[in-house]
Amino acid sequence: MNQPVQKNTLYVGGLAEEVNESILHSAFIPFGDIKDVKHRSFGFVTFLEKEDAAALMDNMDGAELYGRVLTVNYALPERIKGGEQGWAAQPREYSEVLVFGLMLTHGFERQQQEEEMQRIQAENRAAMQAAEELHRKKMAQEREGEKDEEVEGKDDPMARVEAYKRKMNNSEILRE
């Protein structure tokens, strides 16, 4: 069941979600006149000349577009629904297994993304709690220092002036 390739139509895989038909057309027009562009989560680009398609494939297979690595190959001819080549010819269980497998793959990827987000959020919460605890300790130490200064300078007016100056210097440092 070897199908001949279409030498002027290319399959483009690995497209980012932001990529649409207009972007594909703009990215590939430097290689030659484009007859047609079709896009889903992958694309098909049909050139007027086979040489232009070959140039695109040589230059863009493995290249990046919108941060994603492209896969560019010659496209296989479209399958006709029904008959010996289409999905209708496959046993029902085969197509159900494919769909179920795709659903599992998508669900697994989504679960991994959610777990990664939860891990990052937990790390952020822990970092915030540690920073808050450090701030509380620092404030408690400052209050303790103020109390010690008050006790030391209760009877001595010069000691009170010195404690006031230290307090003002500490508050200026904290504001910076």
Image (spheres, grey):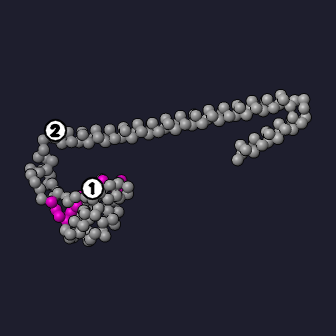
Boundaries of the magenta span = 5-19
Does residue 99 show up?
yes
Q: On the picture, is 38 further left or further right than 94?
A: right
- 53 to 15, vertically: above or below: below
Residue type at mark 1? Answer: Thr
- Secondary structure under tag 1 reads strand
Looking at this view, is 161 or 79 the one in front? 161
Q: On the picture, is 137 further left or further right than 56?
A: right
Q: Which residue, given by chain and number where applicable, does mark 1 sit on?
A: 71
Looking at this view, is 73 or 93 the one in front? 73
Residue 4, quarter of picture: bottom left
Residue 67, quarter of picture: bottom left
**What numbered label is drawn on residue 118?**
none
**Extreme residue in the top direction:** 151
Looking at this view, is 57 or 111 the one in front? 57
Q: On the picture, is 110 further left or further right than 160?
A: left
Q: CA distance from mark 1 to mark 2?
A: 30 Å
Q: Which residue, given by chain and number where applicable, does mark 2 sit on?
A: 93
Residue type at mark 2? Answer: Glu
* Residue at image coords 62%, 32%: 133
Does residue 12 show up?
no
* Residue at image coords 22%, 58%: 73
| Badge 1 density bin: few <14, some 14–19, many ≥20, Cα 10 Å | some
| Badge 2 density bin: few <14, some 14–19, many ≥20, Cα 10 Å | few
Picture mark count: 2
Residue 29, quarter of picture: bottom left
* Residue at image coords 87%, 38%: 161
Badge nearest the viewer, 1 or 2: 1
